[in-house]
Amino acid sequence: MNSIDIDVGGTFTDLVLNFDGKALIKKTPTTPYDLSVCFSRVIEEGAGALGLKIDQLLPAIDMIRYSTTIAMNRLTRRRPPVLSFLGRRHPVNRQLGLLRHRAMRMFGREE
């Protein structure tokens, strides 16, 4: 199974990319002003290491796991996080939507 695991930390955003039986690790600086930026950048780094563009990589991915410690850290410091959403036309959002539809079909929950 091809998968992407992303952990957004206070300083770095880490990626573990399992693709065609290979595991690849990448790291980019976290962008606290907009977490979608570091999310996209780290996927682009992983895709680039495979000689692919992000829009070539994402259709081949079966699962994306996302975790972050930023929200918990900000809540414990009483500084709530600023949330952002990927726009409709953003390539990551488009591919995540396709993955969601694929998952819904797998569980018999057509939309």
Image (spheres, rainbow, N blue to C red):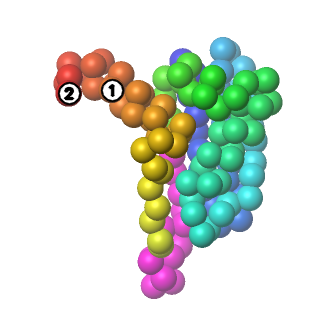
Q: Give the range drawn in magenta.
A: 65-80
Q: What residue type is labelled 1?
A: His
Circles 2 and 1: CB distance less than 8 Å? yes
Instruction: From this view, report whether residue 15 is shown above or below residue 101.
Output: below
Residue 81 at x, y = what percent? Answer: 47, 72
Looking at the rendering, which quadrant does residue 104 occupy?
A: top left
Q: Mark 2 points at which residue?
A: 111
For numbered disc 1, what is the local secondary structure? helix
Q: In this view, does 111 lie to the left or right of 6?
A: left
Q: Residue furthest bottom?
A: 78
Q: Residue furthest front?
A: 89
Check residue 2 in the rendering and tell me which mark sits there, or answer none: none
- Residue at coordinates 51% horizontally, 76% vertically from top-left? 74
Q: In which quarter of the image is the N terminus?
A: top right
- Look at mark 1 in the image and give the residue it sits on: 101
Q: Residue at x 68, y 45 (%)?
A: 42
Left or right side of 37 for 45: right
